[in-house]
Image (cartoon, rainbow, N blue to C red):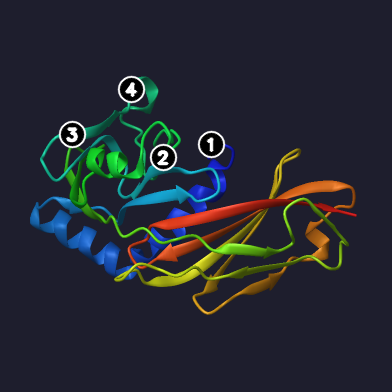
Amino acid sequence: MKRRPVQIAAGVAALALLTLGGTALARVQASEAAGKPIPLAAATLIIEVNGTAGDAGLQFFLDGEPWNSMTISGPNGRTILAVNAQGRLKGWGLTELFSESNEPPFSEVPLEEFKARFPEGKYTFVGETIEGEKLVGTARLSHDIPNGPEITSPADGASVGRDDVVARWTAAAQPPGIDIVGYRVIVTREDPLRVYSVDLPALARRVPIPAEFLQSGTEYELEIQAIEESGNWTFTTSTFVVK
């Protein structure tokens, strides 16, 4: 899924940044005053499954005070990621950071093997600010992975009028304990890259795509994500051509 890092990051950040605001700022100020570790404003760790291609990836996002170093450790205490600012970036610092893992197909790495590599539980984020203060956060990784939606319109490979593009889907049956909290619809044109994205409630099953976004004689990819309460999502894709 490396073809769309900006929209992935935007989706993860949109979920994570719900924690930002006056409350987060107050926590930072209180921690600084007390000499305690400063909490990250946001820290998330989720699983994305491509239901069409059949693969899975681990994604993380963090945001906080400017920092020089950051590590992420799993439930067993072992570090799975370490980032250090170097050269002119050191002392200047980073704030947000987003990345996703490699996504080998399930034929090479089955989902159960992926889960074993990244066990569910609490992951710890520890960093150092540019002032030398400790920066901390936690995120819980869940293995509650939803089944992806079935795209019903436009049909894969269909040719559709510019004014008639309506994304439609049906909700898949979910395993016990899986709770879908919303859907995200993404329409992408590859060259030059143009992305239309909209977040919708759990009961949504359709959304019209603005004609102003579409260009005649152009192929687009439609992606629809089913988002689970944990933040994990599974998506399905199709392509269509605008007449």
Tell me if 44 is positioned left or right of 238 in this view: left
Identity of the residue drawn at 28% across and 55% down: 143
Are circles 2 and 1 on residues that touch, CB within 8 Å? yes
Label 2 – label 1 distance at C-alpha:
8 Å
Q: Which residue is mark 3?
A: 79
User: x, y percentage for residue 210?
Assistant: 77, 66
The amino acid at mark 1 is Lys
193 or 173, which lies in front? 173
Tell me if 4 is positioned left or right of 208 in this view: left
Q: Earlier in the sequence, mark 1 or mark 3?
A: 1
Tell me if 211 is positioned left or right of 34 in this view: right
Query: Which quarter of the figure is the C terminus placed in?
Result: bottom right
Q: Which residue is mark 1?
A: 2
Q: Earlier in the sequence, mark 3 or mark 4?
A: 3
Q: Dot 2: what SS? A: strand
- Above or below, 87 against 128 in this view is above
Identity of the residue drawn at 49% across and 63% down: 226
Identity of the residue drawn at 23% across and 41% down: 116
Q: How many marks?
A: 4
88 or 112, which lies in front? 112
Which residue is farthest top? 87
Q: Earlier in the sequence, mark 1 or mark 4?
A: 1
Q: Which residue is mark 4?
A: 86
Q: Earlier in the sequence, mark 4 or mark 2?
A: 4
User: x, y percentage for residue 48?
Assistant: 42, 50
